[in-house]
Image (cartoon, rainbow, N blue to C red):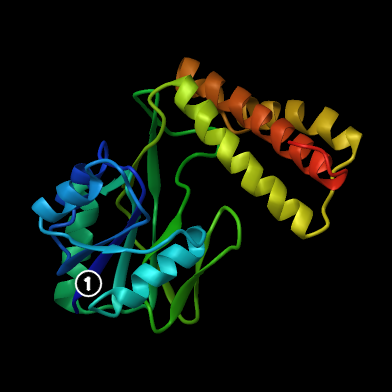
Amino acid sequence: MKITATIITFNEERNIARVIESLRCCDEILVLDSGSNDRTAEIARKLGARVEEASWHGYAAQKNIAAELAAYDWILSLDADESLSEALEAEIWQIKKSGPMFDGYTVPRLAQYLGRWILHGGWYPDRKVRLFNRKKAKWVGDFVHESVVVEGRVGHLQSNLLHFTCNSLSEHLKTMDGYTTLAAQEMAACGKIPGIAKILFDPPWTFFRTYVLKLGFLDGPEGLAIAYMAAFYNFVKYSKALLMSTGRRS
């Protein structure tokens, strides 16, 4: 069993070394870059990764292109702001030694937000399929929240994939602006135009669900920030979708 790690990038010089250095269990590291104007490609090559270029086609499409370019059928797909924990790396080594029993594997994803590891608010374990046989799986999702669909058996690894999210609220807001636009475009494309009632009542419900029902308050001030930003995300997403439906700028 040989594995190609795939990473899609655009201006990821801050993160790229960390993720590549965590991939010792892989036989090839493929970075698919979409026109970075920083040192992403340079750093990746120095660390032994194979760097390919492709214009941006969307998250799912970009990750499928990376999988197609890989030298091996088994794909370990990571984002640039993620890395393997040592325990997860050991699990993957064991699969390579004994041979895969499934066509794809989920991993629990542990996120660091504003410097704190987040265990509540719906953020953990946040399982994702990241290790898969490309002959049996592919990425789907036209706009945002892409995921892997496996046509076969799916196993579950126990150790954490580490996700290094925002270091500041301003960074979170900047990221949110892009994602809410994509989410609103997806809603508009599906004809799911929210009404005023949804815009008014869904955000406070999202805050309550995240902070209280999902125990976000146990993550301290960072948990409070996550709950508030989740509510604000929905408000902005629905507002943009409504404005798009009327032909106004969002």
Where residue 202 appears, x then y in whole percent?
78, 33
**Viewer-proximal residue among 11 and 152:** 11
**Residue at image x 51%, y 35%?**
175
Quadrant location of the C terminus in the rendered image? top right
Q: Residue furthest top?
A: 221
- Which residue in the rendered view is the most extreme toward the bottom? 135
Q: Is residue 229 rendered to the left or right of residue 246? A: left
* Residue pictured at 66% horizontal, 47% vertical: 183
> What amino acid type should be assigned to the residue bearing mark 1?
Ile
| Above or below 247: residue 134 | below
Seen in the picture, residue 135 relative to 29 is either above or below; the reply is below
Placement of 231 over or under 131, stated as above or below: above
* Residue 66, above or below 102: above
Q: Is residue 184 visible?
A: yes
Residue 206 x/y as whole percent? 70, 32
Give me the residue at 65% from left, 42% from top: 181
State the residue at coordinates (27%, 74%): 70
Give how far across and how far down residue 48 sits, in percent: 10, 58
46 left or right of 130?
left
Can residue 132 be seen in the rendering of this structure? no
When asked about the image quadrant of residue 95, the answer is: bottom left
Q: Which residue is mark 1?
A: 3
Near mark 1 (Cα within 10 A), the count class, few <14, some 14-19 or many ≥20, is many
Q: Nearer the viewer, residue 241 or 221?
A: 241
Name which quarter of the figure residue 173 lies in: top right
Q: Quadrant of the N terminus?
A: bottom left
In this view of the protein, which residue sits in the foreground, 109 or 159?
109
Residue nearer the viewer, 20 or 31: 31
Q: Is residue 67 left or right of residue 209?
A: left
**How far across and down, in percent of the image, does residue 158 sit?**
33, 55
Q: Look at the numbered disc 1 and give the secondary structure of its residue.
A: strand
